[in-house]
Image (cartoon, grey):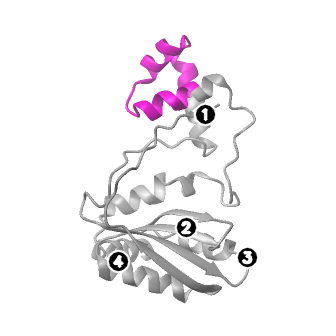
Amino acid sequence: MRRRSAIRLEKSRGLTECVVEWYESHALRSQLQPSARGPVAPAQRVDELDRSIIEALQENGRESFRRIAARLNVSEGTIRARYARLTQEGILQVVGVTNPLGLGFDQALLGVKTSGPPSTVADEISHWPEADYVVVTAGRYDLVVEVVASGRQELLDLTNRIRALDGVVSTETFFYLEMWKQLYDWGTRA
């Protein structure tokens, strides 16, 4: 029952059931263990082959394992096994990246100050489907949160929800006017 009401609520905000289900099943936060919080440190087991696989998928996320295997001179099964491990450990996520502004959504970055450790606030916000980026930072803000909203009213509702959370002292919203650069092909820089 709770699931259906959540889907109805998300649909009323402009998100489809498909998007809600994707967030629940494929978002990076759902692939990590519940207790896994904080930086995803490079695994000690990431070697040159893993880096080459990651770079190939950053270049073309739809490239077949067979082609990657041929290029790297290993078996397709090796690529599949490495891919499975990298995704399971939360090191790699392959998705179609869009420009929310180009799709008609509003997008903003919010700086959040908390009265104590930011982990409780970060945990709460990271479960919201509208929040696509939640990080604990050092500096002026304790958290930086990127949100995607169906319109300005939803953006206002989101900022008010954040402000109402226990432990939130203040927020500052940076509304996106134009997207100039958004790349994910920077490689592993090993």
Residue 18 image-quadrant placement: bottom left
Q: From the top left corner, tell me how far across and down residue 53 is, in percent.
A: 54, 27
Instruction: Indicate which label's residue lies in the foreground, 2 or 3.
Output: 3
Residue under pointer 4: 9
Residue 169 image-quadrant placement: bottom right
Q: From the top left corner, tell me how far across and down residue 92 is, in percent.
A: 55, 41
SS class, disc 2? helix
Foreground of the two, 28 or 60: 60
91 left or right of 131 in image: right
Residue under pointer 3: 117
Foreground of the two, 162 or 3: 162
SS class, disc 1? loop
Q: From the top left corner, tell me how far across and down residue 9 is, in percent.
A: 35, 77
Who comes first in sequence, dot 2 or dot 1? 2
Instruction: Indicate which label's residue lies in the foreground, 4 or 2.
Output: 2
Foreground of the two, 129 or 164: 164
Q: CA distance from mark 1 to mark 4?
A: 42 Å
The amino acid sitting under disc 4 is Leu
- Whether residues under marks 2 and 1 lie with C-beta atoms below 8 angstroms apart, the answer is no
Q: In the rendered image, which quarter contains the C terminus?
A: top right
